[in-house]
Image (tube, rainbow, N blue to C red):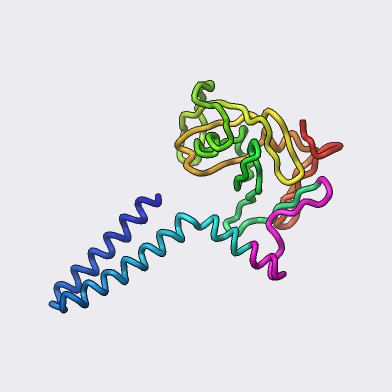
Amino acid sequence: MQIIQLVSLVGFLALVLGSLSVRNMQFGFIVKTVIGWAAIAALIYVVVINKDRIGDQLEAITTSVGLSEPAQVTAGETVRIRLSPDGHFWARATINGVERRMLIDSGATVSAISEGTAQAAGIEYARGLPVQVSTANGTVDARRAQAERVAVGSLATNDLTVFVAPSFGDLDVLGMNFLTRLKSWRVEGNVLILEPHSNADLT
């Protein structure tokens, strides 16, 4: 997706250059104009590939000055996650100690992580059992693996099955095999509430 966006920007710059050339403008002016558009294109590209990080920083700033509520709050052993502007619930989770932003998806039977996350978390998946996973883009091939410990705020569980596939891109998902280890999970208004059984350790 990012490559397509970059190609589109380059194509747009080519059109601008062609338009200026047709008008017989001075070469120096054309070069300056193209450089300006290239800088704008580069800035847009940087923003696109770092949108999650930038969003997190903006959220941290607005939260620190009291302009908004934090997206994820732990109160005792209960974790509350506010609905994201994109209409999804995103959890700040750790997988084997590696922090990730994970989509909470009750439609996913098993949690799924990207190859990058699996490698960062030290999860051995290359020799895992081959499985086929149904996604919004169709059925994809994946490998079954085990995450030693997955935590969302104060909630933590051991030996969670995860599917790993390159086609997941950079998306990490917490599915029903995590949610069913909770005492309850529910949505109130625009907040997802996760509650453990007797303590925060779900295992």
Q: Choose between 188 and 61: the one closer to the eye.
A: 61
The residue shown at (60%, 48%) is: 101
Magenta-colored stretch includes residue 138: no
Instruction: Assign the C terminus to one quadrant of the image.
Output: top right
* 22, above or below 101, in the image: below
- Say which residue appears at 84% left-offset and 38% top-offset: 199
Left-right relation of 177 to 163: right
Q: Quadrant of residue 64?
A: bottom right
Confirm whether the magenta stretch covers residue 68. Answer: yes
Picture quadrant where residue 21 is located:
bottom left
Residue, x 54% and y 39% (percent of image)?
A: 117
| Viewer-closest of 17 and 95 | 95
x, y percent for residue 32: 26, 74
Relative image position of residue 157 (x, y in whole percent)? 73, 34
Give the percent coordinates (x, y) of residue 52.
54, 55
Residue at 19%, 76% in the rendered image: 28
Residue 48 lies in quadrant = bottom left
**Count of marks overlaid on the render:** 0
Instruction: Give the left or right position of residue 120, taking residue 200 as reference.
Output: left
Q: Report the span colored magenta.
A: 60-77
Query: Of all residues shown, which one is farthest toward the right?
Result: 198
Above or below residue 37? Residue 49 is above
